[in-house]
Image: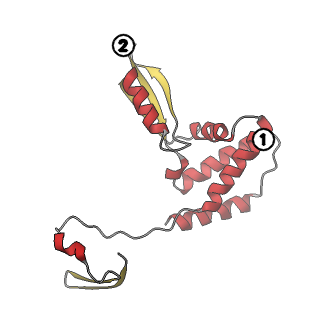
């Protein structure tokens, strides 16, 4: 249902919708519904550019595109460490985590002192990144690209790309 008109007066909200029947009201209970703003999707340009960098690096160094992406994700401080996991629980959680997307990486980083429990680091994929984090990910990939001789764009291009990304995330 889409809201077409809104009026607020003395604590009451009047909504006009595109649903003439309003059948959901028959079972309405306060607290069951929430009004949320529809957000525009994040900038596809910044995301596309990030993947283009991954592809360019992949072609030069000869490793799969997804590995280039995952390596950059591992350099980001966007993760959660979880310890005191049995190896079986860690394996189950790792499998579930990595099914969330290409950048959702899980890796063992340590053993607990008892030797039977492990510590895992769970990296979040870039789909969850804010503007600052996406900028950092692109910076990492730009450094990697420059290191293997891939030409990189002017700073103004990247700044404009990130400004667009920020506008579309609001």
At label 2, counting other C-alpha atoms closer than 10 Å, the crowd grade (few under 14, some 14-19, many 20 or more) is few
Q: Is residue 120 left or right of residue 65?
A: left
Identify whether 31 is placed above or below 49: below
Q: Quadrant of residue 11?
A: bottom left
**Disc number placed over residue 37 in the picture, else none:** none
At label 1, counting other C-alpha atoms closer than 10 Å, the crowd grade (few under 14, some 14-19, many 20 or more) is few
x and y percentages locating residue 9 in the rendered image: 23, 86
x and y percentages locating residue 97 in the rendered image: 45, 38
Residue on which the image places disc 1: 59
x and y percentages locating residue 133 in the rendered image: 55, 50
Asked whether residue 80 appears in the rendered view, the answer is no
Asked whether residue 6 appears in the rendered view, the answer is yes
Residue for point 45% across, 32% down: 94
Asked if labels 2 and 1 touch by Cβ distance under 8 angstroms, the answer is no
For marks 1 and 2 on the same chain, the one whose residue lies earlier in the sequence: 1
Residue for point 61% across, 65% down: 163
Numbered disc 1: secondary structure = helix
């Amino acid at each position: 249902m889409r809201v077409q008109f809104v009026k607020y007066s003395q604590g009451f909200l009047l909504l006009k919708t595109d649903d003439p029947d309003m059948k959901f009201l028959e079972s309405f209970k306060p607290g069951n519904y929430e009004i949320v703003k529809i957000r525009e999707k994040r900038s596809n340009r910044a995301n596309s550019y990030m993947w283009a960098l991954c592809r360019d690096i992949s072609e030069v160094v000869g490793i799969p595109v997804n590995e280039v992406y995952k390596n950059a994700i591992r350099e980001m401080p966007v993760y959660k460490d979880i310890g005191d996991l049995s190896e079986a629980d860690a394996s189950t959680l790792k499998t579930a985590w990595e099914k969330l997307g290409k950048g959702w990486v899980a890796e063992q980083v340590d053993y607990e002192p008892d030797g039977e429990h492990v510590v895992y680091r769970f990296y979040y994929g870039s789909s969850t990144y804010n503007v600052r984090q996406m900028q950092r990910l692109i910076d990492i990939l730009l450094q990697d690209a420059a290191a293997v001789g891939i030409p990189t764009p002017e700073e103004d291009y990247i700044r404009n790309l990130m400004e667009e990304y920020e506008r579309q995330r609001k």
